[in-house]
């Protein structure tokens, strides 16, 4: 079997950690990967091999993570540039080193662009042993093809609550 990697980037939402918890829990319930790695600080941390092993997260830790707002794995605003081949080569070398078959990437527009760029690079270079899965989470609700992104509803709920209670910040 191989391993997987889950990471976050962009702005944190009230639900972004739920994706990490879900990837871990799904693998515990139906073991497909030997290890579930968490990439610290998004693609920037992955390029520096900053990983934590989440494979054996306890049920209690999983519940706490699911209910914790913000980005437990940390975030970044590092944008992969399609013409910067060194980043892609390094990233695929790291994925091979850790036997990572699937990368789940959670975030908004730039995060989904990162997933697209990695998928395009793999296809263009006949790399077939890696998959990239975009997990949209954004308070902006501006991702193409999505009706309502997870994260938008919780942000709208908070804004409505604040306006209803007439809190001023």
Image (cartoon, rainbow, N blue to C red):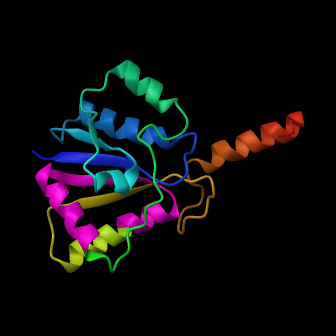
The N terminus, quarter of image:
top left
- In the image, taking residue 10 as reference, residue 139 lies left or right, namely right
Residue farthest to the top, as pictured: 60
Q: Residue at x 22, y 80 (%)?
A: 124
Q: Of 97 and 57, which appears nearest the observer?
A: 97
Membership of 108 in magenta stretch: yes
Q: Residue 136 placed where, x, y %?
A: 48, 55
Q: Residue 38 placed where, x, y %?
A: 31, 41
Residue 158 occupies quadrant: top right
Q: Of 90 and 27, which appears nearest the observer?
A: 90
92 in relation to 153, above or below: below
Query: Is most of the magenta stretch helix, strand or loop?
Result: helix
Membership of 60 in magenta stretch: no
| Magenta stretch bounds | 86-115
Residue farthest to the right, as pictured: 166
Q: Residue at x 30, y 68 (%)?
A: 118
Q: Residue 11 placed where, x, y %?
A: 55, 51
126 in relation to 24, above or below: below
The C terminus, quarter of image:
top right
Q: Residue at x 39, y 35 (%)?
A: 21
Q: Residue 87 placed where, x, y %?
A: 28, 68
Q: Residue at x 35, y 77 (%)?
A: 82
126 in relation to 18, above or below: below
Task: Give the total number of marks visible in the rendering.
Answer: 0
């Amino acid at each position: 079997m191989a391993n997987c990697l889950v990471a976050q980037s962009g702005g944190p939402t009230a639900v972004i950690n739920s994706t990490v918890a879900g990837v871990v829990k799904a693998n515990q319930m139906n073991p497909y990967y030997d290890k579930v790695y968490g990439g610290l600080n998004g693609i920037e941390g992955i390029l520096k091999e900053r990983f934590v092993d989440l494979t054996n997260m306890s049920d209690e830790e999983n519940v706490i993570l699911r209910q914790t707002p913000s980005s437990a794995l940390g975030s970044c605003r590092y944008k992969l540039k399609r013409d910067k081949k060194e980043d892609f080569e390094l990233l695929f070398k790291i994925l091979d080193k850790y036997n990572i078959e699937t990368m789940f990437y959670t975030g908004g527009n730039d995060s989904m662009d990162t997933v697209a760029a990695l998928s395009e690079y793999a296809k263009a270079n006949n790399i077939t042993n890696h998959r990239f899965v975009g997990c949209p989470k954004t308070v902006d609700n501006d991702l193409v093809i999505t009706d309502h992104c997870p994260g938008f509803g919780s942000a709208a709920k908070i804004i409505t609550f604040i306006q209803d209670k007439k809190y001023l910040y």
